[in-house]
Image: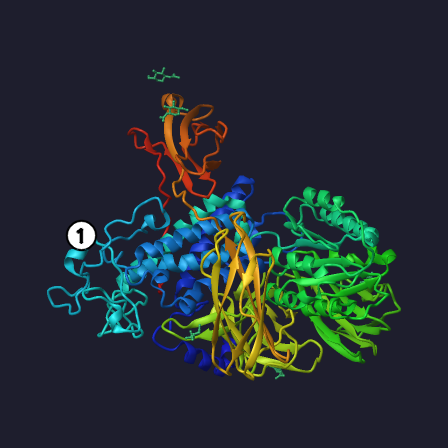
Amino acid sequence: MNVFSRLTMTSVLGIALLVLTLSSPTVAFVPIGGDSASHVSITRNAVLQKVTETCQAVAEAAGHEFKPTGSSPEELVQACLGPTATGEVSGAKFSSALQEIYTQNALLDRNFIYSAPHHFNSEAILEGRSLITGGMAAIKANIRNENFQAARETLGRVLHTLQDFYSHTNWVDLGYTEPYVNLIRPDLPLENLADKDTETCSDSPNQNFPHLILPDILQEKKLTSGYFGIFPSAKPEGKCSHGGASDLTSSSGEGINKDERTSGKEALHDAAVNAATAASLELLQDIRLAAGDNDFLRMMGIARSSVLCFVIDTTGSMSDDIAQARATVYEIIDSKKGTQDEPSEYILVPFNDPSFGPMIRTTDPDEMKSEISKLTASGGGDTPELCLSGLQLALTGAPSSSQIYVFTDAPPKDIELIGTIFALMGSTKSTVTFFVTGAGRRRRRSLKTGSFSDYIELALASGGQAIQVSKRELSLATDIILDTSTSALVTVLQQARNPGKQETFPFNLDKTLRNATIYITGTSITFTLTNPSGLTQDQSETSGRLATIQTVGNMWRIQINSTRETGAWKIQINSYQPYTLKITGQSTITFIYNFVESFAGPHPGYAVLSGRPQAGQPASLLLSVLGKKGPSSMNISEVGLVIVSGGEAVTNGTMTDLGNGDVLVTVYTVPEGEFVVILKGTDRVSNTEFQRQSTTQISVSKVNIQVMVDSSLEPGKPFQLNFSLKTEGAGGSYSISARNDRDFSMSYPESLTLTTGVYANATLTITPPADTPSGTDATLTIQATSSSGADSNYVVLRLSVVTKITDFTPPLCEMVSLLMDDCLNNTSQCEPFHWQLSANLTDGNGTGIESITLRTGKGNLTHTPLSAPIILANYNSSCCLQVVEFVAVDKVGNVGRCYYAYDHSGGPPALTLSLPLWLCLLVSVFIVGP
Ligand SMILES: *[C@@H]1O[C@H](CO)[C@@H](O)[C@H](O)[C@H]1NC(C)=O
Ligand SMILES: *[C@@H]1O[C@H](CO)[C@@H](O)[C@H](O)[C@H]1NC(C)=O
Ligand SMILES: *[C@@H]1O[C@H](CO)[C@@H](O)[C@H](O)[C@H]1NC(C)=O
Ligand SMILES: *[C@@H]1O[C@H](CO)[C@@H](O)[C@H](O)[C@H]1NC(C)=O
Ligand SMILES: *[C@@H]1O[C@H](CO)[C@@H](O)[C@H](O)[C@H]1NC(C)=O
Ligand SMILES: *[C@@H]1O[C@H](CO)[C@@H](O)[C@H](O)[C@H]1NC(C)=O
């Protein structure tokens, strides 16, 4: 048992619920976490191993040691990001990335449970392979375009299908222990598949032959898989069944699947799990080689977490603001260089009227400096601008949980986007802070344009702030960007009051929290801060014993003394005007969460909700708590939902530990109105109590939208997306509105008529233009709103556009010469002698080689220009190291490999100058599912 045991004891109801939803036939198939293994545990083992190897390689190349202090994801990230010492490193991005992969992996058991190719059922072996290779091509194209989220989601689905091959076909029954590499190599044929008319199984195994699979199938090593269906007729005569309670093609329930480690099937099950793990590692290695180590790690969410994202109004009146934004960017880049707080990515989106964008995204600080220096204010006045269009680009382009800063002096003109913006903020959990100059001249909201108060609402919903200042004071306000563009930002408390009232807010400052800062926005505010010993300081004391206080525009910034006391603080605020209170700091202790819904079926589990949780039922959330030493160093004492604007309504959740730091929290009474998640606990490393709050506001809805995308779009081809809509509220007409951030043309029904509790199905058709570059991603938001407007919900989907790949041939490597005489003639010492190898690299009729990189060896690799049809690569190395591996990647990500190792056994040099991807270590885990 681990740390959560104390809680699980108090959570009897939670456990009961879990058991009910996950009861037979496959209790082990908890999609996330748990001691019993699953697709998730196979995936986790493979991903963590591959990330560890990659981190090690990156660290070695950079000349520093890779020494994680433990095996938790947090410690892995800390060690991987290297010894750029200052600042805290948060494991939140890596954990979120892992959750995204697991979530999509698990969804195949909900949305595609009866699709044979997704699970290699019913002899859909070629089709299953196509899903894998098509998915791999999409992942590579997405990574190339830095669309890491789309890449992760596809990776999760592809790994599920790949893993199922080993559980659902007879591969391990045939005696194979290693992965079938041809599944991830579309250039290699799938051979010896049992054809339609070949009988493969017997329904009645007898004493002489106790197997279901026929002896000649085993002897001839013919590949087949079990049929799975809800009708007995789904299985042709003489074929194998998948088996299990939910498979009705088998009258006896017997089948050839190895999903569970049931009695009599232990060995086959273990073999399937080992092969599935090794196969997952091979697939990850192929992606890693195609993407390069750095982008592979970025896809996995291993990067410094701070991303600097600016959305800037560039109309005529904005020149002071642009100058200030530029100064802030320069200051952040210059002051944080070489620290963990140095942003890992920069995003800039200009907007005015009538245009917005393009979005500039770069990892190069100098490029960001140059781009922001190019911005000039021109045209227009402080008339309404396309602010929300610019913000939409930033929300879809930035990684989730980013801090986005908007500079403007005019209300939004494109107010029709506001629902989409709320949805995107909800699904990305990014925080938006507005710096509004010139807000003195408030405009009335008309149907066509918004008003400044929309910015206040948007800021609040995302957990950000709307800071109204004069242009003269803007430089003081931008300190907030320095405070918040940090790698391990956490929120301790956030509350809003409208209208304001006198209220005391208690909060807990733990030992690990650094740079604790309180922000209050509002007018006519007075406050008193009290520390745990009862010392007080009020707003008039700008430099007191407890804190340093600044005020600018409508914002107070209260920096708490770094030698403060730990424990129960409070702040009393007096104002009858609306105000917001936000308390943040830097700490490695944080949490990530997703609302989930359980689903039934042959392989029940939990699916992450894209939109708002369901009203009128308990809410479930999956929560991972992160700390310096991983989940085992943390105790959670309380998780609840708290109303941001009300204060009193906190509802407690019951908790069930799912292992690996994941907790399933069930909240029986969900607050009405906008709420956030609050978490309290004890950190065992620093031995203090901590308190954390999520930032994005959430509310429930009676509307439910179900949709899943499992393949990429092709340029110029209409793509049909089926979705289903249901309400538990009043039936009637629900309006549908869909938007995508790429302006791809779409058609869909504008409204659907719903009967309470019954799904209505509809189709949305989206067509990317024929010239859309391969690897582009589009974020699609579908909203459904009741006719009264009182209830609505949304889903946000990432679509990727990938050109149909016809080049499946990896580059070829042929040795031209090897000069080893010096090494062979001087066996007593290797220095200073050298050896040389040269090889011809070609891509046949393929797309052409794009990169050649050294993977193993410390010698010097050179090559002739990549544009030639035959490229000559030369490798020169010290005799002390007699292994070399380099890879050639073509333009669509097919990977060719050159490998040479001198055989010290005395025989002639061993040459493996071909392409097989290397086989990896096996890790033992348990269950493989459909
Ligand atoms: C955080 O606090 C440290 C001292 O504890 C200080 O050096 C640093 O400048 C502060 N960072 C910010 C962003 O205020
Ligand atoms: C911070 O607190 C310490 C201890 O209470 C005190 O000695 C110090 O003067 C304070 N710093 C400031 C800037 O007030
Ligand atoms: C929630 O649970 C905690 C700890 O069990 C308890 O102290 C607190 O009073 C509870 N709050 C509510 C609103 O039930
Ligand atoms: C609509 O979709 C739901 C869930 O996706 C499905 O259960 C239902 O059978 C579909 N209804 C129709 C009429 O196709
Ligand atoms: C390597 O390529 C060159 C042309 O660049 C060709 O002349 C030579 O025969 C090739 N060698 C091998 C071993 O393929
Ligand atoms: C290495 O030994 C071989 C065979 O004895 C000889 O032909 C060659 O010249 C030697 N090379 C060097 C560099 O000494």
Is residue 343 positioned above or below 237 on the image? above
Q: Position of residue 106 (x, y in %)?
A: 43, 65
- Going by the numbered disc 1, the residue's amino acid type is Glu
Q: Position of residue 427 (x, y in %)?
A: 59, 65
| Image quarter of the N terminus | bottom left
State the image quarter where residue 406 is shown.
Answer: bottom right
Is residue 865 positioned above or below 64 on the image? above
The residue labelled by disc 1 is: 220
State the image quarter where residue 432 is shown.
Answer: bottom right
Q: How is the image coloured?
A: rainbow
State the image quarter where residue 675 is shown.
Answer: bottom right
Q: Going by the image, does 657 lie left or right of 501?
A: left
Q: Position of residue 566 (x, y in %)?
A: 71, 68
Structural crowding at the residue carrying mark 1, measured as other residues with C-alpha within 10 Å and reported as few (<14), some (14–19) or many (≥20): few
Q: Residue furthest right?
A: 540
Q: Going by the image, does 662 lie left or right of 670?
A: left
Taking the image as four quarters, which one is ligand 4 found in? bottom left
Can residue 69 be seen at all in this image of the molecule? no
Q: Position of residue 187 (x, y in %)?
A: 35, 44
- Which residue is painted at 45% across and 67% down in the image? 33
| Image quarter of the C terminus | bottom left
Tag 1's secondary structure?
Answer: loop
- Which residue is painted at 44% across and 53% down in the image? 49
Can residue 468 be seen at all in this image of the molecule? yes
- Which residue is painted at 32% across and 66% down in the image? 259
Name the one closer to the observer, 53 or 85: 53
Q: Count the marks: how many? A: 1
Disc 1: residue Cβ within 8 A of ligand 5's nearest atom: no
